[in-house]
Image (cartoon, grey):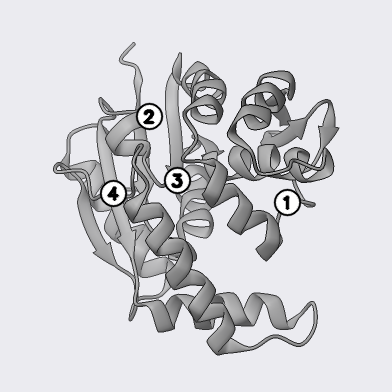
Amino acid sequence: MKKRPVITIDGPASAGKSTISRILAERLSFIYLDTGALYRAMAYRLNSEGWDGAEESLIKLCRRIKVEMRKVTDQLRVFADGEDVTQRIRTEEIGLLASRVSAAPAVREVLLSVQRALTVEGGLVAEGRDMGSVVFPDAEVKFFLDASARERASRRYLELTERGAVCLQEIEDDLLRRDSQDRNRPIAPLIIPPDAVIIDSTDKTISQVVDIMLCAIENSGHLPACKK
């Protein structure tokens, strides 16, 4: 039997990668890998450990911290030192710290093996910042999902207003800061893989983006039919 493909979805923060990847994986009956959650889990534990920001202590801590993905009722959940932190890592503070530590070679080395171990049987939708360029360079299908900074900030604003008062401009400023960190880090910066299908989701619905991806996968020859 032909191995099912690995599909990567890269893009900047709040471009819709997580939502789109989950739906795409569900439509294809593939495993959904939220690689950003791994870095957030590492950042969460570093924060809990009171990391002082020094590179030397980062190396020691990240090699001691155990981050893993476990399948729980057909969903992958992220654990840090045995604790399910899937819900606890979705804060702006942890997101900014994750973006910072994701550039550290020691952190990337620890988490790279965790990610690649999930591709043994294929059938994987992986989203992050460097999935198609670094982690899975041989992925059969690659996407780069983008949107304007204002659109991404508006989406994040709607999510955060449910938790309390937030400022749209501050969110946009944070996103632009994170974009700069991700695009300019010396190791595995956010880039568009040369063989990726580029999708600007600014004026598109979730369903439209998913349909574009499904048909691109079909046209690549890695699926027998475009699933609707």
Residue at 59% x, 40% y is 39
Residue at 53% x, 59% y is 19
Q: Earlier in the sequence, mark 2 or mark 3?
A: 3
The residue pinned by badge 1 equals 89
**Residue at mark 4 to residue at mark 1: CA–CA distance:** 25 Å
Residue 173 in sight from this viewpoint: yes
Callout 2 touching callout 1 (CB < 8 Å): no
**Residue at mark 2 to residue at mark 1: CA–CA distance:** 22 Å
Callout 4 touching callout 1 (CB < 8 Å): no
The residue pinned by badge 4 equals 143
Q: Amino acid at mark 3?
A: Gly
Residue 225 in sight from this viewpoint: no
Left or right relative to 27: residue 222: left
Q: Amino acid at mark 2?
A: Val
The residue pinned by badge 2 equals 135
**Which residue is more in the foreground, 135 or 138?**
135
The numbered mark at residue 128 is 3
Callout 4: helix, strand or loop?
strand
Q: Amino acid at mark 1?
A: Ile
Left or right relative to 194: residue 108: right
Q: Residues within 10 Å of mark 1 (few under 14, many from 20)?
A: many
Name the mark nearer the viewer: 3 or 4.
3
Q: Earlier in the sequence, mark 3 or mark 4?
A: 3
Name the mark nearer the viewer: 2 or 4.
2
**Which residue is more in the foreground, 149 or 5?**
149
Q: Position of residue 1 (x, y in %)?
A: 34, 11
Q: Quadrant of residue 156?
A: bottom right
Callout 2: helix, strand or loop?
helix
